[in-house]
């Protein structure tokens, strides 16, 4: 049973991600049509998440560097 789940996890994950993408697109389309100020705030949130991801990546890269022995 575990091998079956492991083998088909990519299919299930692809279906879930597709459903989330469609739902997100529909919600953002409705928000853009009816709430322009909310869309401005959403752009700020997206920018903050991208910035947080960039900082996380830099920190993880620095942690992965080998220690220098003096």
Image (cartoon, rainbow, N blue to C red):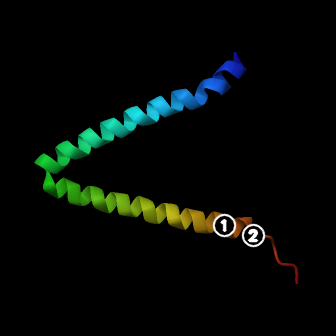
Numbered badge on residue 7:
none
- Mark 1 crowdedness (10 Å alpha carbons): few <14, some 14-19, many ≥20: few
Q: Residue at x 66, y 66 (%)?
A: 61
The N terminus - image quarter: top right
Frontmost residue, 60 versus 9: 9
Label 2 residue SS: loop
Label 1 residue SS: helix
Residue 19 in the image, given as x and y percentages of width and height: 38, 32
Quadrant of res 39: bottom left
Q: Residue at x 52, y 32 (%)?
A: 13
Q: CA distance from mark 2 to mark 1?
A: 7 Å
38 vs 53, left or right, is left
The C terminus - image quarter: bottom right
Q: Residue at x 56, y 63 (%)?
A: 56
22 vs 17, left or right, is left
Label 1 belongs to which residue?
61
- Residue positioned most to the right: 70
- Mark 2 crowdedness (10 Å alpha carbons): few <14, some 14-19, many ≥20: few
Is mark 2 in CB contact (under 8 Å) with mark 1? yes
Quadrant of res 11: top right
Residue 40's place in the image compared with 1, above or below, is below
Residue 44 in the image, given as x and y percentages of width and height: 31, 62
Numbered badge on residue 65:
2
Frontmost residue, 35 versus 6: 6
Q: Residue at x 51, y 65 (%)?
A: 54
Residue 6's place in the image compared with 35, above or below, is above
């Amino acid at each position: 049973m575990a091998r079956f789940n492991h083998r088909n996890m990519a299919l299930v994950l692809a279906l879930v991600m597709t459903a989330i993408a469609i739902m997100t697109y529909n919600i953002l389309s409705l928000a853009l049509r009816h709430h322009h100020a909310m869309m401005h705030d959403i752009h700020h949130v997206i920018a903050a998440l991208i910035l947080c991801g960039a900082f996380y990546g830099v920190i993880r890269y620095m942690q992965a560097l080998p220690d220098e022995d003096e």
